Amino acid sequence: MPLEGKPFNAPTAPPEHPASIEPALPDDSDLVARCQRGDTAAFDELVTRYRGKVYAMIYNMVHNEQDAWDLAQDGFLKAWKSIARFRGQSAFYTWLYRIMMNVTIDSLRRKQVGGETEFDDTIALSHIDPNSATTPRAVALPQDKIAGDEIRARIDAAVSRLTPEHRAVILMREIDGLEYQEIADALDCSIGTVMSRLFYARKKMQTMLRDVYENL
Amino acid sequence: MKTFEEKFTAWVDGRLSGAQLAAFERELEAHPEALADKEAALDLGNLLRSNLPPAPLPNPDFFNHQVLLRIHATEAPAPSPARRPIFWTLPRMVFSGIFLLLLSTVFYFLAVPATRREVRQNQQYVTNILNARSDDPGITATSFHSKAENVDVLWLDGPAYIPPGHKLK
């Protein structure tokens, strides 16, 4: 039974049919304990549980499939190497989320230092020749899909212009629905810092996307 | 919550209540644009949630496979069969050298009688070189080094005289 997409605070979903003879899935702490004894099959189960949420979260941060895949891989590898030090003081997913955020934010910072250009919406969909060989798939789809893709491109462009820390807080809050404390745990900072970063991230996004949400 | 930013964020997210909410709303009277800002923040949240659906992970099974491959690749290799340790390590060699030196010193003092050591120390002549080569058996020559006077001595017995052409040089 796949568990991807579960709520943040519910690492193990209760069985939908209690009377079912299907054996209960081990909870995260059991799997973690097995991992700490070197059981890679248990870690495989944890990867299966959280890979979807982790990948989606990273994808929203980096806007690139390959980068998101690689960073999620790096994050899980790092989690395996550090799992012996996990003491269960927070939920496993909170701990994993922190690792993934560190990996992603470090990568974004390296790209900024390395001079890689951020997404530039001046060369977005409007600059792509509809008849070119690389025509976006959206062109062949209905009008509403085109609008959706354009909105998505605008959002991606706006997110790309935020600092890694501001990206993280606004995506964790608005997309993943995390509480301030959970965000603070994941980013290893205070709740006050989270709230302050959220304030400025929202302000910047509002400035960049005002015309989009006002015209919807 | 100390700063305006923190309180504003809590207000937007509905985390203020009671006295805190009332106090902040009084504070907002000086910020007439605050209500519009709150509406804009809520609209932004709705926009993000409705347009950023979770991106599906491509090839999820391969993802797991690759993670496990990388884990196995980074695992510490099995320890190789134990090699025989080298006996003559540097500290052992130094220790053995010192031990042998002490042993030989002790052996010297035990094995060589003290009287003989004293004789050696008190001997007047260190070197005796006998180089007697003469047709006349009545003539002998002895050479030695005198420690006291620090000179080499050639002692001749037998010859009545030394020819003038045989002066020592």
Image (cartoon, coloured by chain):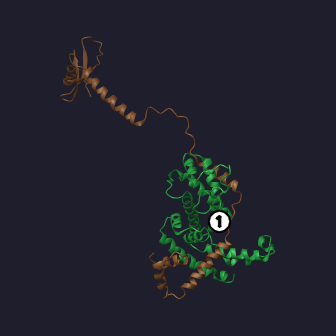
Q: Which chain is assigned brown? A: B
Figure check: A167 above or below A72: below
**Percent of width and height locating residue A70:** 64, 59
Quadrant of the rendering where the N terminus of chain B is positioned? bottom left
Chain letter of disc 1 in the image: A
* Residue in the foreground of this view, choosing between B11 and B154: B11
Q: Residue at x 36, y 33 (%)?
A: B95
Figure check: B138 above or below A196: above
Q: Secondary structure at mark 1?
A: helix
Q: Which chain is assigned green? A: A
* Residue in the foreground of this view, choosing between A140 and A22: A22
Please identify the quarter of the rendering in which residue A77 is found.
bottom right
Residue A119 visible within the image: no
Q: Residues within 10 Å of mark 1 (few under 14, many from 20)?
A: many
**Percent of width and height locating residue B114:** 21, 21
Q: Residue at x 53, y 64 (%)?
A: A186
Residue A88 visible within the image: yes
Please identify the quarter of the rendering in which residue B56 is found.
bottom right
Residue type of the residue flagged with mark 1: Tyr
* Residue in the foreground of this view, choosing between B121 and A75: A75
Q: Residue at x 31, y 26 (%)?
A: B104
Q: Residue at x 54, y 74 (%)?
A: A198
Q: Is residue A97 left or right of residue A155?
A: left
Q: What residue is disc 1 on?
A: A59
Q: Is residue A165 left or right of residue B116?
A: right
Figure check: A137 above or below B30: above
Please identify the quarter of the rendering in which residue B38 is found.
bottom right
Question: Extreme front residue here?
Answer: A19
**Percent of width and height locating residue B57:** 69, 61
**Percent of width and height locating residue B28:** 49, 85
